Amino acid sequence: MKTFKKIIKSPIFIVLIALIAIGIGFSFFTAQGSSEVTTQEGLELLQDKKAKEVTITDGDNRVNMVLTEADEKYGENVYFYFVDARADQVVDAVDAADPADGFNDEVPGPNWLSTALSLLLPLMLIGFFVWIMFSSMQGGGAGGAMKFAKSKAKLVSKEDPQVTFADVAGSNEALEELAEIKEFLKEPAKFQAVGARIPKGVLLYGPPGTGKTLLARAVAGEAAVPFYSISGSDFVEMFVGVGASRVRDLFEQAKQNAPAIIFIDEIDAVGRQRGVGMGGGNDEREQTLNQLLVEMDGFDATTNVILIAATNRPDVLDPALLRPGRFDRQIGVDAPDLLGRAEILAVHAKGKPLAADVNLQSVARKTPGFTGADLANVLNEAALLTARMNAQIIDARAIDEAIDRVIAGPQRRSRVMNDQEKLITAYHEGGHAVAAAALNHTDPVTKITILPRGRALGYTMVVPLEDKYSVTRNELLDQLTYAMGGRIAEEIVFHDPTTGASNDIEKATKTARKMITEYGMSNTVGAIKLGDGEGESPYAQSHGAPYSDGTASVIDREVQQLLENALQEAWIILNRNRHILDSLAAELLEKETLGHERLDEIFANIEKLPPREQWLSSPERPVSDKPPVQLKPHLPVDELGRGSGHFGGGSANNTRAE
């Protein structure tokens, strides 16, 4: 019975009934109580003089007849149609019949009801398809079209399982900042009593995977308030005004359920700076942003609704959105340091059986630059690998394999290289490793493999000992040199380079160009920022570089000179340490993968590259006669034989591409 009622109330059923009614109406106005006969039968009735009244309807090619006597088969009124080719024959037949009541020609006049029915059918079909479109945009249902302008935010109720601060690790500073938000939502009177104004909005910015959404959910969970979550792209539709309407509806819902938290993920999708887009001025996105600004201004001290937004592009947001009074508090959420990585690993290790040889501190040291999402993926991949091997406990070998999978992709066992390609790959990766080990400002080489992974035929892992937040010029020059080590090894050993160094050359070129255009590390160009770098908009990129062709030529020459110097240094290192390169390549061919302990033994007697000459930014600024100030920390040695201080900042992985 419920199913039957549901069918009756469905719009499809209503449309079908309407179509049937229209069809019946057309039949009624078309037939008008007459019976249709064939053309031949109609001519025979005329020939037998059985018609007392005849009307020829012009334009319809139709003949209506009133018979002298009602026929048992057709009744008294009949009609038939004829084609243009038989028009003369029909007229002659009517003349010959000479109906008693005569005959006449008729031009049909407009019938308002028939016209209305003919227009109603296409209008109903158009309305039905419009209803279907609006309903699909809203997710279906009888009320879909009416809900199209409603907010798409997902409500996480107070009764649902909550994320708390205990579930967040590696973001201590962010948690401290957000703790005040929790206190305000739980006890607003305490702050209002002393005249404090809690921020109306909190902007969380940082690279993807650092836990911005998790932090927002944790604030809502700690404060035990409703949590409205929506993506910035959910506001913008092709219909102008829909986004603004959704913003109004979202804030209205939050105010009705205050205290509450509104979380907008990827707010840069709707909050980009106005007037710089390709679409021009007053488009749908800008109207949505304007409404968002108005709603944030509408907050008052007693609203108890806080807006939290997340983005990884704070540089493109509109200044009006970031001013005090809207997003008062802006919190950076970066990749965690060593301690943070260990804490995150501990959180995600809950519920996973780890073997005794798994040391999460060691795993944290092996994963510099990893975000919280990366670390969660490492442990999940390790668990999947363990289950795939039908094991019950996750061991250190599974963890190491998971780290390699996250960095370089899964191992491609189906790709079988021939002996010559293996030999070239061994010398290529050995060239990277020997060059890195012989330089004075590089991080230690921790792993080399010639097993294909992802798009790489092999890779060399160089892991920093400490978390680094800035890099010196000599360190960047060392990166260029060991990046070119693989290419130079191919030239020295095989006298014929391969395409395997393409990825190395690409990375080295990007680093060298940044040294010139962003870091001011050229005494020819000087300490000047040229261009917007990676944050440059597509519009700016399509209109060329924001400097002259002459300056571009100087930059290209400086970049080429840096890369040529790197090639020369790599050539010197590998020629002086050719015996180490040969033995390293031979061992790689035998074992395919070498770890840090064996590499330390191989590089114990390597000949280092002499220190470079002191770089001067200008001859007018000579080197100080005082030695550079240096801090020599005494770092304890851990079980890996390495300093136990923080290390991270991103691993430098050189790969030999396909």
Image: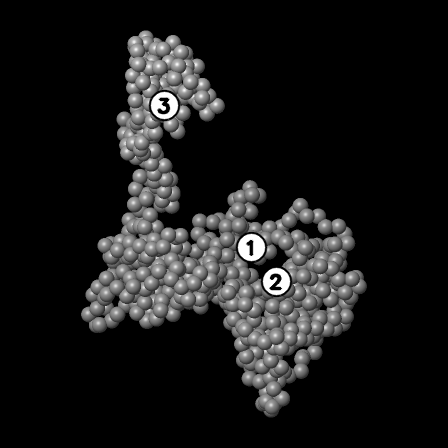
Q: Nearer the viewer, residue 576 or 9?
A: 9
Q: Relative to 45, is 371 on the left or the right?
A: right
* First in sequence: mark 3 vs mark 2: 3
Marks 1/3: CA distance?
85 Å
Marks 1/2: CA distance?
12 Å
Query: Counting other residues with Cα less than 10 Å from the Cα at mark 2, is it few (<14), some (14-19), or many (20 or more)?
Result: some
Query: Counting other residues with Cα less than 10 Å from the Cα at mark 1, is it few (<14), some (14-19), or many (20 or more)?
Result: some
State the image coordinates of residue 370 (x, y, percent, origin top left): 51, 61
Looking at this view, name the residue that lies furthest to the right: 495
Query: Counting other residues with Cα less than 10 Å from the Cα at mark 3, is it few (<14), some (14-19), or many (20 or more)?
Result: many
Identify which residue is drawn at 75% across, 56% down: 423
Quadrant where the N terminus is found in the figure: top left
Q: Which mark is residue 406?
A: 1
Camera sees residue 641? no
Q: Quadrant of residue 616?
A: bottom right
Identify which residue is drawn at 36% across, 40% down: 126
